[in-house]
Image (spheres, helix red, strand yellow):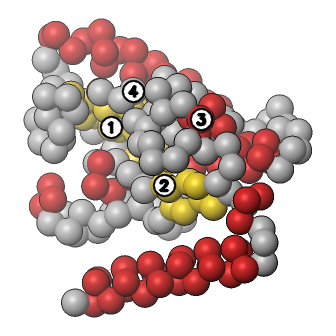
Amino acid sequence: QAYYAVVSHLDQQVGTLVKQIKAAGLWENTVLIFLSDNGYHLGSHGLGNKITMHAESVRVPMFVTGPGVARGMRSQSLVSSLDLYPTLLSLAGAEIPDWAMGHCLTTVFRDPDSTVRQTVFSECVGVGGKPAEGHRMAYDGRYKLILTGTDELYLFDRENDPGELKNVIDQAEYAGIRKRLESELANWMRTIR
């Protein structure tokens, strides 16, 4: 009941915002981007919190509407919240600095099959943690490598195991995938230190 009340209130607030933007005559020149915080496990994997790299915890919903955004489409393109900064700069007509870590998503807004990333990374260092020392993840759209804060490794084949329940890290047929994702994760960790 409390969850339904919060979601209903949020929906009403977004509706009020859209009405005010339209009333001000700005709707045709406004890109509205909605995303939320990452989710809680709520019992999946025997966990209640949200500080792991499993899909229930790390995925963030994002909705985009406005000029230059294809209507009614859904994309499976790998994106990161880091991509919002260069995207917003691009939409505003500003130059994207070389040091920006994200990728501009405007091509994905126009074509749901376009890609800006081959692999997406994430980390959760927790309170007082240091970059590249907490839970980390490399995900290529099918395979997800997780490195925990205590250096445990997990590899999930999300096509065959969407619930991320079977760790295939030591299975020989996944050795090449493991090596590639470990290398990509290590390179990413070096860039964020």
Tell me which residue sits at (48%, 55%) in the image.
62
Residue type at tag 1:
Ile
Q: Secondary structure at mark 3?
A: helix
Q: Earlier in the sequence, mark 1 or mark 4?
A: 4
- Check if mark 4's residue and mark 2's residue have beta carbons within 8 Å: no
Q: Residue 75, image x and y in percent? A: 43, 38
Q: Earlier in the sequence, mark 4 or mark 3?
A: 3
Q: Separation of disc 4 and disc 2 at Cα? A: 19 Å
Q: Secondary structure at mark 2?
A: strand
Q: Separation of disc 4 and disc 3 at Cα? A: 22 Å
Mark 2 surroundings within 10 Å by alpha-carbon count, few (fewer than 14), some (14 through 19), many (20 or more): few
- Residue 23: image quadrant is bottom right
Q: Quadrant of the N terminus?
A: bottom left
Question: Is 66 on the left or on the right of 175, as rendered?
Answer: right
Mark 1 surroundings within 10 Å by alpha-carbon count, few (fewer than 14), some (14 through 19), many (20 or more): many
- Residue 80: image quadrant is top right
Residue type at tag 2:
Met
Q: Quadrant of the C terminus?
A: top right
Residue at mark 3? 110
Mark whose residue sits in front, 4 or 3? 3
Question: Is 132 on the left or on the right of 167, as rendered?
Answer: right
Q: Secondary structure at mark 4?
A: loop
Q: Is residue 178 above or below residue 22?
A: above
